[in-house]
Image (tube, grey):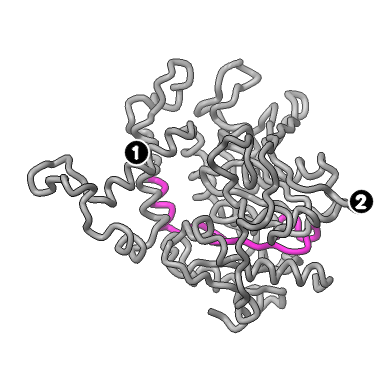
Amino acid sequence: MSTESAAYLLPVEEDEAVASVGENIVKHIFTFASPEEPFVLENRQTLPRVDVAYEVYGELNAARDNAILVLHGLTGSSHAAGKYAPYNRTVGYWDGLIGPGKVFDTQKYCVIAPNVLGSCRGSTGPASIDPRTGKPYGLRFPIVTIRDMVRVQRVLLDHLGVRRLKLVTGGSMGGMQALEWAVMYPDFMDAVAPIACSARLSAQAIAFNEVGRRAIMLDPNWRKGAYYEDGQSPRQGLALARMIGTITYLSDEIMQQVFGRKPASEESALEHDLHARFDVERYLHEEGEKLLKRDFDANSYLYLTKAMDLHDVSRGYASLEEALGRIQARVLLISIRSDILFPPYVMREIHEMLKRLGKRSEYFEMDSAYGHDAFLVEYRKMIPPLRHLMQKLEEGCG
């Protein structure tokens, strides 16, 4: 833990005692672009219509400069907090961070959570209808990048009348977007907090993504992405891709602690039955099934992992230093001790580069055994550094 983290060693509040943002959250859809004025992507391909799903918690102030932009990971959505209905059993992925009195206090700030371009949670993606054909895009959908996602989000914020962001934050793919925001729109925010991510994706992470994509593409029901109209989607391939991803989200440490070599049940005849499972095998299969139950689109998985592969904030600049040199916002970088996808040294290197460039950067390393998933599973450990950042902003430290 860095010395700059010392100020963060504060008691973590019990968020359950604080009111949630509500049990009747509304998902909004904003639509822009047209065949006459399409949205032009980084690769110069175009989209004649773009839908953006988003949720809002809190209200914009008169100056319209109190917005916090929260960005989700690979298979996430715009549902960051609260419930859609009282009977729902689950809440948004960062419900413990967003709400009255919480670190992202909706009595002070307006939290905006969009679904990314290329996803299947309300925003335009491969499963969307192509206005030019009247059929789902499938593989006719153009390749999108993290920068394209950020540019769509900027159009959304302009539509909502946001004049300046107090903070941009997100974990994993959301952290990639947050860092790109700071480079692309350096004078539009007070602070940025990328979590568990990198400035460009590593070869190892790209390799894992490719294996996941091949699992989908080798499913006979994938049919080169044209599976929407007959109702037979590549479920087995998508479940396998999720199982592969899940292995990278956990650390060896937590897998040993939770699963070890335990059989899935006492009755498991591991020495006599090829289909008998260890407990860790059971867990991986359950994670694959969970993604299927969420009706996540397999083609979206392909496109979003490719966008992560292409992520490189230095693309188009002479160097990474030149790209990061554009950042004007206060920076808080949060890594996870046991993260094998984005090891702590990756974010420490960004922090050290920013400090050499004279930027206002702080680094915090979460002490968690949960691996990459810790920013969701043990989000409470991020509350002290995030609260410290928000206090700095409220004090006008910038």
Upstream in sequence: badge 2 or badge 1: 2
Residue 357's tag is: none
From the image, tell me which residue sits under label 1.
Answer: 215
Residue at the far right: name it.
62
The foreground one among 124 and 337 is: 337
Task: Give the image quarter of residue 252.
Answer: bottom left
For residue 62, the mark is 2
Q: Taking 77 as reference, is 328 above or below it?
A: below
Q: Quadrant of residue 175?
A: bottom right
Please tell me whether residue 178 belongs to the stretch shown in magenta. Answer: no
Give percent across and percent down for residue 34.
Answer: 75, 26
Residue nearest the observer in this picture, 322 or 365: 365
Question: Taking the image as drawn, is residue 379 in sight?
Answer: yes
Q: Secondary structure at mark 2?
A: loop
78 horizontally vs 367: left or right: right
Residue 304 in percent (x, y) is at: 52, 42
Going by the picture, which residue comes out furthest to the front?
17
300 or 200, nearer to the observer:
300
Density class for disc 2 (Cα within 10 Å; few <14, some 14-19, many ≥20) is few
The C terminus: image quadrant: bottom right
Identity, as a three-letter code, of the amino acid under mark 1: Ala
Indicate yes or no whether the magenta region holds residue 207: yes
Residue at far bottom of view: 3
Which range of residues does the magenta coloring cover?
A: 182-210
Residue 51 in percent (x, y) is at 68, 31
